[in-house]
Image (cartoon, grey):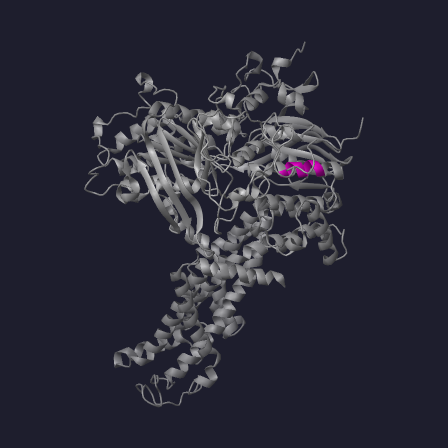
Amino acid sequence: MTGSAVWRSRLAARWRQAGATSRRLLIVGAVVTGGFAVVALLAPGLAPYGQAAHDAPQLAGPRLAHWFGTTNLRFDVLSRVIYGARLAFEVVLASTTFALVIGVPLGLVSGYTGRRLDRVLVLIMDALYAFPSLLLAIVAAFALQRWVGPGVPAAALSISVIYVPQYFRVVRNHTLAVREEPFVDAARAMGAPKRVIIVRYVAANVLQSVPVIFTVNAADAVLTLAALGFLGYGVPLRTAEWGFDIGNAISDVGTGAWWTSLFPGLAIVGLVTGMSLLGEGVNDVLNPRLRAAGMGSEAALPLLDPEAAPPPEGAEDGPPVPEGAERELPRSIRMVDADPPGSGSPTGAPALQVEDLSVAYRSSRGPVRAVEGVTLGVGAGESVGLVGESGCGKSTLGRAVLGLLPAVAERTGRVVLDGVDLTADADAWRRARGDRLSLVFQDPATRLDPLQRVESHFVELIRAHRPGTSKAEAARLARATLAAVGVPPARARQYPHEFSGGMRQRIMIALAVVLEPRVLVADEPTTSLDVLVEAQILDLLTDLRRRLGLAVVLITHNLGIVAETCDRVAVMYAGRIVEEGPVAGVFAAPRHPYTQALLSAVITLETQAPAAVPGSPPDLAGPLPGCPFAPRCPLAMAVCHDVRPAPAPVGPAHAAACHLYPGADPGHPAQAWEPTGRRLRLAEPPLAGTLR
Amino acid sequence: MTQPLVRVTDLAVHFPIRRGVGGGKAVVRAVDGVSVEVLPGETLGLVGESGSGKTTLGRAMLRLVEPTAGQVEFEGRDITRLGERELRPLRRRMQPVFQDPHAALNPAMTIGDAVAHPLLIQGLAPDRRAARKGAAAMLERVGITPAEAFLDRYPEDLSGGQKQRIVLARALVTGPSLVVADEPVAMLDMSVRALVLDLMAGLRRELGLTYVLITHDLATARLLCDRVAVMYLGRIVEIGPAGTVLAEPRHPYTRALLDAVPRVDPAAAGRARPVLPGEVPDATALPGGCRFHPRCPRAFAPCGSDGTEPVLGLVGEVDVACHLWDNPR
């Protein structure tokens, strides 16, 4: 079947992605567990004596005939340990399989069906789950011994009672999430019966988590079996079982016979460790996202990153630390008498200067060059829009400026903030982040800690960067800033979920500006918002920029937003800036064919026949000689495929990296231009039919 | 007068929710008294902010949510209370297209199986081989070529544009008359939106489809729709020909939506546009009077909590629910 081949290749890819540590864990765990499994399988051949043969000398120490010694019941310890492994595997496999067979279907049906069945099952499972697990197993073992009689099935069933609720809960919760996916709606809309939907659309996606629980539970089951045996429940007397043997050996300890308890004990520790390592490893390889979430925590909440706090001795060369009560309100609050520094005209040296910045992500296919030699300056009070298709590197550039790249990224080039090269001083970068250099993300819902009141987000941030500030002072500042962005200060003690999406984005913006940053990077700040709220947020950003003299980098795919709120625009393609200039100039007369194509693709209320950009962006892992847009460019010439074009001036403060403009005259007036839909035609007609 | 393909009468869809620990129950009135007809062959746009009820109305037309009150007729037949078994044969004639192409395809199913499955479920193909053949033909039709190269691939390898074409193929493979498309291009890159919209327009012509296009993007609605219904808090506040509604809006809400659309026109750079304050209120506690009055720049006495809720009334060729138009001249 082709499906299994795909799964194999996916697993192989996951294996490569997993870190070396995870892989080593997995290998060690697999070897140890595998070793025990081999011993268990070959027990009758390996064990020198039978498991129930009790004709050895009583309580004899290790010797040639009995390597691990003998017990007071005249068993050979080595044989007991070997047969014990066999029993452990039998019971563990049977119990986890029972639990899986009962718990998984119940979880699927309960989660998908919902309503009363779900409520009843959840109640039962929660009750079982709340019960101390060993006690539960003992009760079950006691009952089953009466009905089924002692043996592997009884022991396995009594242990499986502990795990059924675990499978049930994990599968049910996962099912609840998958049930809401559009592809399940699609299955309902095609009239698929419930049973088909559960099996082919829900179970197929939910069961990925099962192997992980399986391996984790297996280790736990070894311990539970031993505990039951130790207490005298579970398997029949005389059956070799590690826990039972240890329980038996307790009285020997006083006599100095260490071997009767040590070897079964070591066997338990060995198998549990092996299985746990295996479980951890499988988890890491199958669910790389869980690991990534841990790794990316810094990226998730950079403003509250504990690392962002200055070292205890205080910020030596950081911004002046105002003292508690002397702390001034942000300019945003006392703006009434502040002079707006012109309508967004850059003043003096740029607040942010990015120089020849490149970022490459390590991948199994070689470096993915997400950003390639970007140079960009943003002045105080100026707003630069960064636009391009998804995957063009605009978000990576934003993160690189903040110094928030993931570990797999390699960066070269400089990021200079107010004349300080942050790339040369990791400490200064860390202090600046959340302070003079701040960030607003696309989705405010996931960037606020749901368990913290809005106010404490501010208090934590302020006190991390301004250690002298009192809590009361920080809270006062928080309220003043919230008021300035249009959040009623009375709501400061509410939790994030009590706010609407627009209000949460206002809170994020307040967090970003509370320490009066010099530079604000806004990555798709309004993409998750409705158009009316988007307009409010954009107005707020523009207002703050003018009042605080912020240098704003606005990352967006929406050219309309750039046209209305930015002073300059930088168009990115394949990690490079291909055109840059004043908004009015670039939008009126775009020079790079990519910018022209992008503008033609915008659908506006006036669009009659929209144009698409044919083809798709290049693979950034491959070699990109020449102009990366050449394969899609209607005007490509021979030179475009071989020589990388350098940015050349094409108008006042307007540059394009395109061979059409080799050192064009900067004074040359830009040509009049109209979108493709009306005038310029791409190489092939982008639209096969016409609309309406 | 042609028979409408879909006729929705006084439809209400309410969702009960629980509020926090120990909190009381509340009802979200997602759709709250909507009557609308979809004519065969037309494209009807449902526009509005999130929380306006446009998605729920679309799902109710497909019977993917249970109506609380009112009636939904499809091809002249009342489907409001039909059971899943009776609905099954009708399902092939009405299909959804979703916003997020990445979530709309089952990650555990190959492209071929995903598109072939509706044929098997609906009994339109005798076996899997025949169904995959039908799927391949539809994939070619939506521009996934050569289809054979895609049949055994999983969705994760494909781009958003490709996935949305496959979602379209899956919706169209059973030969529906009605397609309810919920933000079909919102998650796609600007550069491929035109391709997908053009494909949808072409398929509508070739297959004689009727679209209900749910979108917050007025420009997309303007481009694709014959008629547009503007929704606010579960009600239609304005409905009429797309060209008229989106060029000369009568309702202050429609006006506000149009004003808020960012323009790429460089001449408009930095223009101060009127920004409507506030946000869509909680649909569990609807304002009295006109639902829009707390945000409306033109609200006057009859609109307030003491006033009455305006009803749709014909003004020219457009139906508007607004007290400003109570006595059209």
The magenta segment is: B195-202
- Image point 65% across, 55% down: which residue? B149
- Secondary structure mostly seen in the magenta stretch: helix
- Magenta-colored stretch includes residue A378: no
Check the image and report above or below for A470 versus A188: above
Check the image and report above or below for A102 versus A43: above
Q: Residue A511 appears in which quarter of the rendering?
A: top left
Q: Position of residue A297 (x, y in %)?
A: 38, 47
Report whether residue A570 is seen.
no
**Left or right, A411 with reference to A196:** left
Task: Return the residue nearer the eye: B116 or B73.
Answer: B116
Task: Return the residue nearer the eye: B4 or B24.
Answer: B4
**Left or right, B269 with reference to B152:** left
Q: Position of residue A556 (x, y in %)?
A: 47, 34
Check the image and report above or below for A57 versus A244: below
- Image point 77% across, 36% down: which residue? B75
Task: Return the residue nearer the eye: A295 or A116.
Answer: A295
Report whether residue A615 is seen.
yes
Name of the residue lying farthest toward the right: B1
Check the image and report above or below for B57 versus A257: above
Q: Position of residue B45 (x, y in %)?
A: 65, 30
Q: Residue A402 appears in which quarter of the rendering?
A: top left
- Image point 51% across, 24% down: which residue? B266
